[in-house]
Amino acid sequence: MNNQTKILLISPPQKFYGDSLGFNVYFPLSLLNIAAMVKDLCHVKILDCLIEDFEIKKGNNWTLYGTPYPKLKEIIKKEAPDIVGITIPFSSQSESAKKVGIICREIDPNITVVMGGPHVAVGYEALLHEEICDFCIVREGEITFREFIRKMISNEKIHGLKGLAYKKNHKIIYEPREDLIELDNLPFPAYELLDHNKYLQSPYLYKSRSGIAANSISMITSRGCPYKCTFCSIAKHMGRKYRYHSSVYVIEHIRYCVEKMGVNNFHFEDDNISLIKKRFGEIIDKIIGNNLDISWDTPNGVRAETLDYNLLKKAKKSGCNSLQIAIESGNQDVLNNIIKKNSSLKAIEKVTGFCNNLKIPLRAFYVIGFPGETMENIYDTINLALKLFKVENVFPILLFATPLYGTELYNECVEKKLIDQIFSDEELSQATQFYGNPLISTNEFSKDDLKKIGRYFEEEMNRIISDGTYRQVLTNKRALFANGKH
């Protein structure tokens, strides 16, 4: 290979099953980030199957969104890439990514296939053993991918490259890379490689994820999570050390999106944007001080304990359209000793009151069905969710505990033989829906028990909601937040 090396980065089609929550289009940030790191070394293109030649195909209990596979095959043939990079953002979408890898093999066995993304961080060994790909970028990909491409172009040996996993003599070779600390050294995502208008004009742009879906874009300003919640896999992908862009970098990034793309709605997708209250306050102050006329929300959620009344008041002034918090359980013992979240229900309820007072629309995640929970514990969660909705206007999103690969919850469930060790995409996709199919059962509750509780919760919500149903509201966030009302 040489500096004429052609790289094609692909965001695969997505397949949804049964009653899974709605399909969403979003800017492929991970691909934009690594493209920005290698665009000076080679020819790089991005193929987003959720945008290009977009079609919807329905089957028995499933819907496939994106570029049809025959058309995708034609595009890859035409582009004739030397290297194809495929992202797997969700374990429940791994089969679609594998299909793309197989297509590359069929077109030309000499194409180097590389995979990356959150699922790869926990599933790289299986992918390599299945020979779906040649290499896996594990965890943060910017530096690793740049070094990988540089070595491929100069025909250097890749042995010893940290962050890269590959198979040699039937053995998986992988040495972890240290966390990337100085995030401000990273360039902005390579937005110029996409036609941003195709995203902004898509009717599926953040359709069921946000009340400010139109004319919007995601932004991630920090990485890592120091907490040890048993069900969360983010540490496997981004580590436990909290790292972040400076408030100056964040404001310049926002300004770039406003001025270059005309975007005025932002989704801060950080897992912990408010972890350092001072920094979060600086970002808010700079949005206000620079007269940035934007709206923003936090679809991934924030920890309630990191918020206070004054911070929330400034957030509202800066354009905060809504917040999402992760309450998880209505039982303090479950929070402390079963899921190890160690958050305070008293502090959470205090923050819900602040948001209601300031008229900041608030959503909350609740999760039921953890090993060690009793039926009484589960109903503590149900009752809290209903109470906060009625009293403080906190819209609840109820989910089943899902043992994601690599989590403490997964390991516990395997050890206690509560689950099968390998799940299909369909099982994972439906497991998190309260009206879907839970994966965990214990001596305290069965899968049918959880489904009955889900139906009970839905019925209770329908009694409270005067306009529409709980399911309709869940799949139409624009209506949910239209006037800051539920």
Image (cartoon, rainbow, N blue to C red):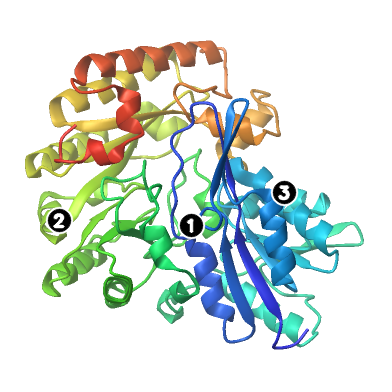
Q: Quadrant of the C terminus?
A: top left
Q: Residue at x 49, y 60 (%)?
A: 28
The label nearer to you, 3 versus 1, is 3
254 or 76: nearer the eye?
A: 76
Determine whether 151 is above or below 297 in the image.
below
Q: Which residue is mark 3?
A: 99
The answer to whether residue 174 of the structure is visible from this angle is no
Where residue 311 is drawn, which disc sits there? 2
Could you tell which of marks 3 and 1 lies nearer the N-terminus?
3
Q: Position of residue 345 (x, y in %)?
A: 26, 33
Mark 1 residue element: loop
45 or 357: nearer the eye?
A: 45
Q: Residue furthest right?
A: 169
Marks 1 and 2, how far apart at CA: 25 Å
* Residue type for callout 3: Lys
The label nearer to you, 3 versus 2, is 3
* Residue type for callout 2: Leu
Mark 2 residue element: helix
Where residue 240 is drawn, which disc sits there? 1
* Residue type for callout 1: Arg
Q: Residue at x 39, y 19 (%)?
A: 378
Determine whether 471 is above or below 202 in the image.
above
**Is label 1 in contact with label 2 (beta carbons under 8 Å)?**
no
Q: Quadrant of the N terminus?
A: bottom right
Could you tell which of marks 1 and 2 lies nearer the N-terminus?
1
Determine whether 445 is above or below 10 in the image.
above
Q: Position of residue 348 (x, y in %)?
A: 23, 38
Q: Position of residue 456 (x, y in %)?
A: 36, 12
Where residue 349 is drawn, which disc sits there? none
The answer to whether residue 68 of the structure is visible from this angle is yes
Neighbours of disc 2 within 10 Å: few (<14), some (14-19), many (20+)? some
Mark 3 residue element: helix
